[in-house]
Image: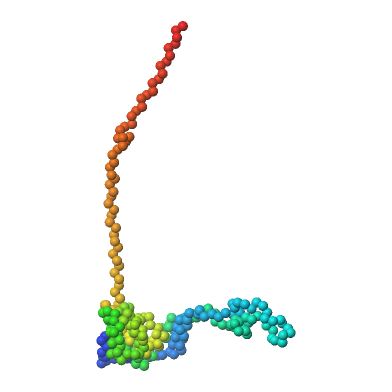
Amino acid sequence: MIEAAHYSSAGAKHKTAFALPADLFDGTVNEPVLHQAVKTYLNNQRQGTAMTKTRSFVSGGNQKPWRQKGTGRARQGTTRSPLWRGGGIVFGPIPRSYYSDIPRKVKQLARRSALNARAREGALFVLDAISFETPKTKQLVALLGKMGLEGKKVLLLSNGLNRNLYLSGRNVPKAQVMTFADVSAYDVLWSDAVVVEQGALTGDAPVAGEAAEPRTPAKKKTAKPAAKKTAAKRAPSRSEGKAPAKKPAAKKPAAKKKKES
């Protein structure tokens, strides 16, 4: 069983050491896997944007510098040959991707190996909880000073998201804050000392107030029902108010009397 130094939230050391969980800290350190994990991590940080010009990208050199024979010099076809100053580059770097990946179980093995390496060296410390009421860099620096870690590269692993701790440690040059679930083998090997919250190792839920306060959804403004518009009564027009007048029937022309013969 591997044990680690146990400290309180104020930085006071407990008399008894903390027994690390056996499923994660079994004492084995697989160096080839650690090398593979670190190499993969560093490869994935490369941008791969370096580029040099081959002779096809260098301008000029269309004419033959001198004639083929009779000059006593070596034959040359272009001044942009890699043999000439200002010419192209042979086998120079071109933009490419350096991305590489390793299996998930290999990553987990490398992570366990890195934590076991720090635990065997006595460079792993367990804190009861890291709870700051407000983000304050001075509090974190004082806590690390009480633990004897001042001036060292310290990796702080919180139990879940701890916003106040992150804001307090991001201004410390040699401190790095992240959650225990997101730590990689490279991060552990980068540090000189690893400080872990006790709840991250025991699987306890984060203490209330440590995690970032969830934002309460803003209340949606409910639109008031629009008032029914009452149609304004308008005075009927003359044509609408009165019934249409009937036109008088046209008089039939009177029949002409026949002249009596």
The quarter of the image holding the N terminus is: bottom left
**Quick check: can you spot residue 234?**
yes
Residue 25 lies, with reference to residue 237, above or below; the image says below
Q: Position of residue 90 (x, y in %)?
A: 59, 83
Q: Residue at 29% across / 38% down in the picture? A: 236
**Which one is in front, 159 or 248?**
248
Specify the quadrant of the image occupied by residue 196: bottom left
Q: Position of residue 40 (x, y in %)?
A: 46, 83
Q: Position of residue 151 (x, y in %)?
A: 34, 90
Specify the quadrant of the image occupied by residue 3: bottom left
* Residue at the top extreme of this rendering: 261
Specify the quadrant of the image occupied by residue 190: bottom left
**Which one is in front, 36 or 51?**
51
| Residue 75 falls left or right of residue 49 | right
* Residue at the right extreme of this rendering: 70
Q: Residue at 30% across / 76% down in the picture? A: 212
Q: Residue at 36% across / 85% down in the picture? A: 173
Residue 244 lies, with reference to residue 97, above or below; the image says above
Q: Residue at 45% across / 88% down in the picture? A: 35
Q: Position of residue 107 (x, y in %)?
A: 43, 83
**Which one is in front, 97 or 117?**
97
Residue 14 lies, with reference to residue 48, above or below; the image says below
| Residue 51 falls left or right of residue 260 | right
**Quick check: can you spot residue 159?**
no
